[in-house]
Amino acid sequence: MSTLERIISKELKKAVTDDLKDEDLRKVLEAEASQMRESRWDRRLGELLEKLGRNRSDLASARKGEGWKVALARRLREDYLVPYAWIAENLHMGKATSVQSQVSRCRTKSLNKDHEWNLIKS
């Protein structure tokens, strides 16, 4: 999603929620938006796992800091600004702060030699 699309989406959501006077309706709208985002994140995770030749059971059985998991976390974060807490839970990577540190290190190291990142970077 481009920066412009995010701004428009954010402004549209704000305009819609500003128009909603009923607090219950606002809660329903926010819950549905959250479910749609999480579905999109989950679908993207599945696509990336497929590119790596891995599956969801590999997420649970592999170590928290495996290179391919860190590459997945980075891609999810860069594609959809997926919260680190969601990434940590769904990729079985421990605490959100640890995932954030690992993704940051992944961004700063030389990526030309990182096979997993090269598979999913586009």
Image: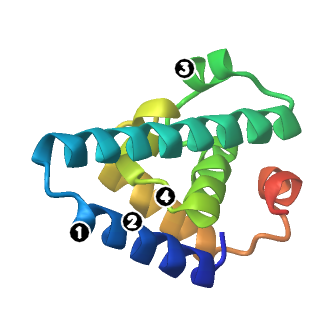
Amino acid bearing label 1: Asp
Left or right relative to 4: residue 24: left
Q: Quadrant of residue 78?
A: bottom right
Which percent across, then down, holds residue 112?
A: 85, 71
Separation of marks 1 and 2 at Cα, in angstroms: 8 Å
Amino acid bearing label 4: Gln
Residue 18 got which mark? Answer: 1
Which percent across, then down, holds residue 95?
A: 32, 42
Return the residue at label 4.
Answer: 102
Separation of marks 2 and 3 at Cα, in angstroms: 35 Å
Separation of marks 3 and 4 at Cα, in angstroms: 18 Å
Count of numbered circles in the view:
4
Amino acid bearing label 3: Ala
Q: Are marks 1 and 2 in contact (CB under 8 Å)?
A: no
Q: Is residue 107 above or below residue 33?
A: below
Separation of marks 1 and 3 at Cα, in angstroms: 41 Å
Near-viewer residue (10 or 84): 10
